[in-house]
Amino acid sequence: MVYSNTKCVSAISTKGQASHLNALGALGFGAASLGNLYRPISDQAAIDTVAAALATGVRYFDTAPHYGFGLSEQRLGAALKAAGIAPEAVTVSTKVGRLLVPTNSRERERHGFVDAPALEPVFDYSYDGVMRSFEESLQRLQLTRVDILLAHDLGSQTHGAQHPEQFHRFMAGGYKAMCELKAAGLVGAIGLGANEWQVCEEAMAQGDFDVFLLAGRYTLLEQAANLSFLPRCAELGVAVIAAGPFNSGILAPGASTRGQRFYNYAPAPAAILSQVARLEAVCTQFAVPLAAAALQFPAAHPQVATVLAGFASAQEVQQAEALMEMVIPAEFWIELYRLGLIDSAAPCPVRSDS
């Protein structure tokens, strides 16, 4: 069933498409950490982190009601206002698909967020749910519109056997709401923010979308999205935001660092630790930081508009910017291809100064 024939003109360009709106930049700011993801940060630290990002040239910021149950949106809005930057000078994306309702829970950590407001996220992909979520997000962000609106966490990985029902609810209701918001000029582009490329393909077959934020599924560790999903996006002119370039952390410090290593939001299994160790061996051979390779790899795909990484401090922003700018020799990528550590069809970064 196709739910709508509405054609939404894309407000985002990929590197293979000419557009005056190609302004996401090489590196985007994932604001989940501003919602106290895994550990609390202060309001001032949030302001300082956003200010550092702006100072390094970052102009794209992604958030969601789920991140700290509104806290991330509130802090991002306050930080952008404190910086005195005009709304049109930055690109902001947020998400719909969950509503925040009061809770009596006294747990300090819920859903990975620490010391967050006493609110509980409840899935709601209906027309009314999306409209209400969007309105509440505008208030928290202190904005009158957002550049990108994404339906959050559709897919069987999140919903299991309930995925068909949730997807139908979204396409019959929430998707219609998003199209109306875009037609009214309150949203610049619409899409999905997901952890699985399969649901993005399903969405493309059912409706008309501008952009997909894909978290952790096109990285130095995983390139299956390049088999059918990314080529289909190219055919339809749909941009891709490559989020989660460190695969929940394992590609930042690596496999040999002391302490628990996380992959896909869980302790990394032995097979992943082994693969990362092989990547690290090549990194050592060429004196390339693993984190630099992880950040730069997804950016090489022509359909990827930006790489989105999470930051919780000004220092993390500055480190990521330096890693993104680091020159990596072509021989490094050639060796990864030779060893079968990256798919032969996946583009690798090419720099004129390498």
Image: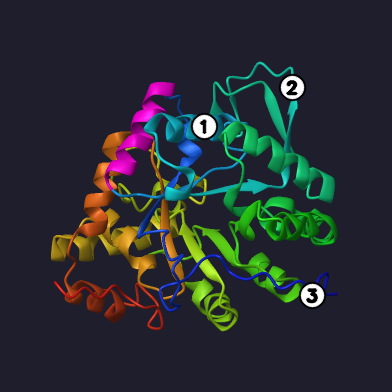
Most foreground residue, 213 or 223: 213
Which percent across, then down, holds residue 273? 38, 55
Which comes before the other along the chain, label 2 or label 3? 3
Q: Is residue 96 left or right of residue 239?
A: right
Q: Name the quarter where the N terminus is drawn.
A: bottom right
Q: CA distance from mark 2 to mark 1?
A: 17 Å
Q: Which residue is identified by label 3? A: 5
Q: From this viewpoint, is residue 90 visible?
A: no
Name which residue lies at 49% across and 61% down.
241
Q: Which residue is mark 2?
A: 103
Query: What amino acid is labelled 2 in the image?
Result: Thr
Q: Position of residue 147 (x, y in %)?
A: 56, 53
- Rounded to the nearest whole Å, what is the CA distance between mark 1 and mark 3? 37 Å
Please say if the residues under marks 1 and 3 sit with CB atoms less than 8 Å apart. Answer: no
| Rendered view: 4 above or below 80 | below
Q: Earlier in the sequence, mark 1 or mark 3?
A: 3
Q: Which mark is residue 118?
A: none
